[in-house]
Structures are given as C-alpha cells and as structure tokens.
Amino acid sequence: MPNHLYDRLFAPHAGSDRTFLVLPDGARISYADFLGLTARYAHALKGLGLETGDRIALQLAKSPEMLALVAASIQAGVVFLPLNTAYTAAEVHYFVENSGARVLVCDPGDADKLTAVAAACEAQLVTLGSDGQGSFADLAERQPAVFETVDRGADDLAAFLYTSGTTGRSKGAMLSHDNLLSNAEVLADYWRFTADDVLLHALPIFHTHGLFVATNVILLTGAAMIFVPKFDAAEMIRLMPQATTMMGVPTFYTRLLDDPRFDRDLVAGMRLFVSGSAPLLAETHRQFEDRTGHRILERYGMTETNMNTSNPYDGDRRAGTVGVPLPGVEVKVCDAEGAELPAGEIGTLEVRGPNVFQGYWQMPEKTAKELRADGFFITGDLAFMDADGYVTIVGRGKDLIISGGFNIYPKELELLLDDQPGVLESAVIGVPHPDFGETPLGLIVATPGAAPDLDTIMEDLRARLARFKHPRELLMIDALPRNTMGKVQKAALRDAYRDRFSA
Ligand code: MLC
Ligand code: AMP
C-alpha cells in the first residue's frame, strides 16, 4: 500500500546488495539486509498491538537496530518519538505520558530505570537487544523478512520530536511524512548527494540533524554511512579517509581542529563538510579553510522546520552566515506583528514551506502562538537578511542555551533552582564556552538570612536532569538586575559573566 515516506526512502532499495551502513570495525550492512530487519521489526510492532497512528517512544543507544526500528515504525504507520539517551527517568516519564505512547523501547541496561515509568504511563516496556527472553529482537527474529507496508499519506504524522519551550515544559513537534520527505529531497539535491557518497555519521540519531538531515539524505540517494556510535576526534580521523562527506555541530569542527593530525592530506577524499544546529564562529570557518582547503557549508534549521536556509554548494559560502532560503522554503525577517522588514534590518525569522511542522501535540494555544494562520512559523531567532538573500543570525529572541548542539531551556533549570531550600530566586544564563559554544551558568539569590548549600543543590539537579543540562557552575549573587518592568535583565548578566569559562 502507498506510504509517502517509506516508498521514497526505503522501498526503492528492496533487494539491493549495495552497502547502507559501514560499522567502525568495517562490517557492512546492505540495504537488503537492513530492509529485511526493518520488515521483521514492523511485524513485531504489530505483534505488540500497535495500531496505525499509535506512538512508540524510543530511548536507545545509536545502532543499526535503532535505525531499523525507526524505519519499521514508518513502514507500520506508527509514530515514533526518539529520546535523548541522556534523559533521566523523570524526563522520559513526561515524554511518554504527554505523547500517550503505548510502547517504550529501551536498551536492556535501562530496563530497571524505566520499569516504573512505563507502569505509571500504562505503556509496555520492551527491550530492543536480544536477551533470549522475549525482547523485541527475539520477537522479531521469528518474523518474515517481508511486510505489507501500511498506507500513509503526505500529511499523516511520522514522528514527534520533543522540543522545550519558555514554560520549561517540552512540546511534541508533530512532523508529517511530507515534512520529512520534502526537506530530504531538497537537501540531497542542493548538496549534490549521489549513490557514490559515504557520509561519516557521528551525530546522535534522536535529533533532527543526525536522524532526518543526515540519514534521510543518504537513504534518498542510496548512498552509504559510516555509522559511528558517538563523536570521538581520534576515531573520526581514523575513518575520515573512507568518507566523502561529514555533517556535524560546531563542536565537531573545533575538536577536529584541535588535533594536528587533522590536515589537508587526511581530507583529500572529502567533498563536503556541513555544519549546523548551533552558530559556527566565522573564526572556526577560516581556520578550517586554512587547515584543509575546505569551506564548511553552514545551514540553519530547527526541530519544527527541518532545514530552512543553506549556504550554496557551488556559490559563495559566507562565514558567519547561514546562507540563503532553500528552494521551496520562504524565509522573511519580521517585526513582532509579522510585517516583513527591509534588507539589513534585524528582526525575527519566520519560515513557511512544506518543511514546517503540523503543530505541537495537544497544545493548540502554543501552536497558535508560534504558527501563524498564514502558515509562517515564528522561529524566535533574531537575524537580518542581506540584499542578496544571505541570512545572518545575530541572537535569539527565545531564552535558549545551545551547548554542543543540545538545547537547554533556562526556565526548566530556574524552576528547579527556585524550589531549593534557601533560594529566593534564580537566573540561568548561557555563557561562551570554548568546547560547547555555550554553557549554562546558574545564578542564585538567597532568601534573606538563609545560606543555601550550592553542592547540595547541584546534586539535586544532577539527579533530575540529563547530564548536558547541568549548570557548569552555580554562583550566589546579591540580587538579579531588573528593568523598570521588573523583568530580569539577562543580557546584562550575560555581559557580566561573558568570560567566566573562556577567558
Ligand atoms: C555530552 N555532554 C555534554 C554534551 N554532550 N554536556 C554539555 N553539552 C553537550 N552537548 C556531557 C557528557 O555526558 C559528559 O558527561 C560531559 O558532558 C563531557 O562529555 P564529552 O565527552 O566532552 O562530550 P561528548 O560525549 O564527546 O559529547 C559532545 C558532543 C555531543 C558535542 C559530541 O554533545 C554531540 O554529539 N552533540 C550533537 C548534538 C546534536 O546532534 N544536535 C542536533 C540537534 S537538531 P560526564 O559526566 O561523563 O563528564 C537541531 C536542529 C538543527 O538543533 O538545526 O540541526
Ligand atoms: P532545535 O530546537 O534543537 O531544533 O534547535 C534549533 C535552534 O538551533 C534554532 O532555532 C537556532 O537557534 C539554532 N540553530 C540551528 N542551526 C543554526 C546555525 N547554523 N546557526 C545558528 N543557530 C542555529
């Protein structure tokens, strides 16, 4: 039966013995083998009682099997929500409960951590890896390697990706089959991907960048990926000579540049380096060109929109800019009312196109605040556009910290800090960090007469929040600077602590 995404990304590779995945030890998985596993998994999903449109939550280490489970969800018409492996049980609880996921899949080592979560959310907990005792892999093992694809149209939902908001509570961005397919088609073409490409893939596959941008472009073109579990500069340097392209967050690039073995000879076979998810410093762009002769191609996107702008493949890749609107995507710089501003003026970026999501799951008011009736999505990013269409992002209207490509919403941390004994109020700000780009710093004002213990507070935060969200440091200050309206002046705080970790 027709399935908008499966029919373009996967079905054309049926029976193909071309390599899809290369593992770090050199083992290869062909498209045919991957699709056989996908079909068995799709049967197993049905065996779990999942119906078309049901949600499945995945908190799994990066592996070919996890990718096959994503593919199987698409083939079986099940909406998948991939979750950061760093999330604590409390964080996972929210996503499973909010999405109404009927099944939560984890690695065997995490089953103890998540048993209570699944029970509380009335979801089935299933482990992926084979344990000989009825794990998902064991269930799938007995299934046929062919599955009749479930009928799904362009507007049907494929995935939920959770992304935080200013309230500190995450929202499930609903992405349709065509949101994902249309963007992959544009990117594959714009960046000139062909079946001869080999992508060095070290990004996590629970976010847009590693899952949709990187993987879907490869699937669409029948190319191959060297599938590395996580970024490690030495491992990247070892594998680079086998690749033709790489996609990464800016931290990948600064870490590679820190290694003298990363040089022109090493990248002789590479044709393209793409950066995104966080601002790439113009300085890094220049250093990279000096060292390798390559100009990094920077692009800009979001969970809600996939990719919006990109520097050109052949034309001028301008350091410090995120390039021009992608074909089919409208991008404008607007004032608060949504009126377009003239070239060169700073305003909020708004985007519209087939890439823009369907709204936030069961949050119509939040959707209405960010998605205009005419289809333009208000990104919250502050930017200007040159007369020739190049977009430069100058800041964020939204209170967001991006550390190594992971988003941290200060409000989520501030709510926890404000609840601590002896804390009157708090502010969490992002300050420059040489490795992660930005890092959170927690500023605390004590209740008069109280002496909150910062170590105890940090310990409490560690127990509740994923590692990457932990403030790098907590500091006690006398008062938070406020404007005449009583609003905390975060810009002043950021200025005051700018050099805390980078001087
Ligand atoms: C890991 N840690 C981080 C972190 N990643 N802390 C802050 N920020 C991060 N991004 C934790 C580790 O758990 C570890 O904890 C400690 O910090 C130091 O770890 P590390 O070894 O230095 O980090 P590493 O594991 O190497 O990870 C860094 C990284 C990784 C940059 C390689 O974070 C990464 O792959 N980031 C990519 C994120 C991404 O894909 N973003 C795309 C979002 S999509 P401890 O306790 O062990 O010391 C999107 C849309 C778009 O934004 O436009 O693409
Ligand atoms: P996320 O919510 O994880 O999808 O993060 C999206 C945000 O990352 C965007 O709204 C931007 O603030 C930021 N971002 C993505 N790509 C870039 C880029 N190339 N330069 C600057 N910021 C970026």
Image (spheres, rainbow, N blue to C red):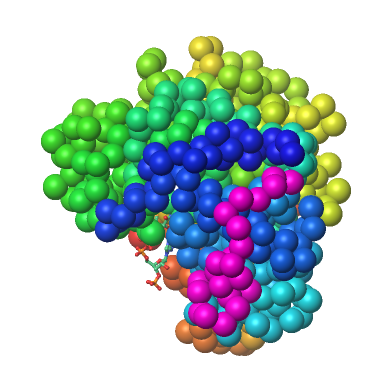
Seen in the picture, residue 56 relative to 437 is either above or below; the reply is below
Q: Nearer the viewer, residue 50 or 355?
A: 50
Q: Residue drawn 69% across and 29% down?
A: 354
Q: Nearer the viewer, residue 442 or 58?
A: 58
Left or right: 173 with respect to 243? right
Left or right: 40 with respect to 318? right
Please count the marks in the image: 0
Considering every residue shown, the one lying at the far top of the view is 387
Q: Nearer the viewer, residue 87 or 409?
A: 87
Magenta: main secondary structure: loop
Whole-percent x and y of residue 262? 18, 44
Seen in the picture, residue 29 relative to 446 is either above or below; the reply is above
Whole-percent x and y of residue 156? 77, 41
Ligand number 1: quarter of image: bottom left
Q: Residue drawn 63% across and 40% down?
A: 6
Whole-percent x and y of residue 113? 58, 82
Magenta residues? 126-150
Q: Residue drawn 51% across and 37% down?
A: 13
The verdict on residue 282 being magenta is no
